[in-house]
Image (tube, grey):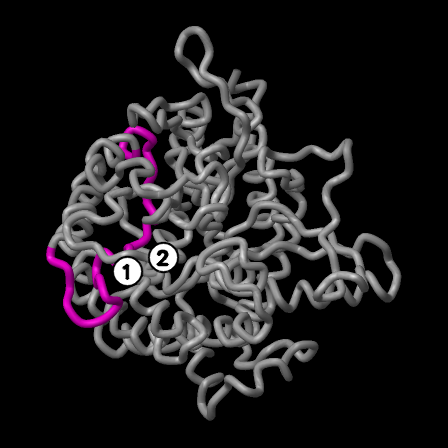
Amino acid sequence: MTDFPADFVWGVSSAAYQIEGAWAEDGKGPSIWDTFSHTPGRVARGDTGDVACDHYHRYREDVELLAGLGVGAYRFSVSWPRWLPEGRGRVNRAGRDFYDELVDELLDRGIEPWLCLYHWDLPQALQDAGGWEARDTALHYADYAASVLSVLGDRVRRVAMFNEPNAAAVAGYLLGIQAPGTSDLTSFVAASHHLNLATGLGLQRLRSERSGLSLGTIVNLQPIVPEREDEEDRRAAAVLDAFWNAHHVDPLLYGRYPELTAGMFDDVIRDGDLETIAQPLDWFGLNHYSHHRVAADPASLYGLALVPPSDDAETTAMGWEVVPDALFDQLVALREKLGGVPIYVTENGAAFRDRVDDRGEVHDQARIDYLARYLRAVARARDAGVDVRGYFVWTLLDNFEWHEGYAKRFGLVRVDFETQERRPKASYDWYRRMIETRKIEDAAEAA
């Protein structure tokens, strides 16, 4: 068993579009994910987030689950089009009231709200005006951030500017597998830069208008491993490392893009942009699941190809390799980049093929084993001097898993999407004991 200190933050994370449902209720405007999921062929089995976990109507039940779990923090995102249906201008009173009441409910149960301002659901009205390819979207984002915190900032202290801007840019603008479904290098470059610019503008705006906030941002970082130790594969790994990791870390921390790809941004950077982006952070959020293995592939569009795990590799239902050492390596690497900025692991978890047994129970031992091994990697990193101050499981509820729809289940609580019944899994009880004791049980001990 491994001990964690009493002030270590234990939490779970979620995202508005993945759980809220109520996609067109109470004045909410459409988001790019509403449009994307309603487009035939975009999401597996034609699933949409129209209802999802119905959290918009059932949030009190879900906060009760959080309280039973014993977490000290809950990271959730605000739906930009629920707050501002047109992306700017008029605030939607019903949307504002929903988050107002959610924050109060969390605080009443002793759970600290960690508010993420953007988790991929851009208002469709702004997408129609150019989306993240348009510089104005970054300016609208700063206005939106200020609007949200003008209402919630008296009770919310922890604020994340973005969740995984790198994933939004790569999956949404380069590969086209997620909203808005664009696959174009020029679009990807513009979107990446404007997401970075919005981060800096949001940090500036909130610091100028409100005191007492602890401001950070969240990036999904994965070590990039060359398949072979030859020049071609190492270069392919360097390219992917720039596209996935460095494009949204280096500008924020160093005020520059990585040398390998910096020239790509010449046409979108304006004077002062990099200085605006490189704002100080109070904390850094790391989302992490696995590593990427890559090989050179001259026939592919970008000269590289992801290498799938070997047949004998341990994988999750997402096909991601289980590599706890990759989380340790990423945390150690971040220590060198961040200096004294504390780190929180803001997402880590796994999808498995859960089954409800004859007694109505879900014995998800594979998830327990995954979480225990990754938490040991966090403990090792702390022992190595990395200032990791908290850990958030992805996620509380089985939910809409983006382009995978509802087939991939990450939750500590099983959701029957027909009845909306919530059923805590064995991993829910395991994590509750983990929080109570601050000691890691392995799967055998939990069983």
* Residue displayed at 36% across by 61% down: 160
Residue 219 in view (yes/no): no
Q: Residue at x 22, y 38 (%)?
A: 59
x, y percentage for residue 98? 17, 49
Q: CA distance from mark 2 to mark 1?
A: 7 Å
Foreground residue, 265 or 210? 265
Say the numbered circle drawn on residue 80: 1
Secondary structure under tag 2 reads loop
The residue closer to the viewer here, 164 or 390, is 164
Q: Which mark is residue 152?
A: none
Stretch of the chain drawn in magenta: 66-93
Task: Classify 22 as above or below 284.
Answer: above
- Which residue is at the far top? 358
Could you say where residue 390 lies in the image, as x and y percent from the top left? 44, 48
Residue 80 position, x and y percent, is 28, 60
Relative to 421, 173 lies left or right: right
Question: Hey, what amino acid is under mark 1?
Answer: Trp
Residue 168 position (above or below residue 106) = below
Task: Give whichever of 109, 397 is nearer the camera.
Answer: 397
Residue 121 disc label: 2
Asked whether the beta carbons under mark 2 and mark 1 sit within 8 Å of each other, the answer is: yes
* Mark 2 residue type: Asp
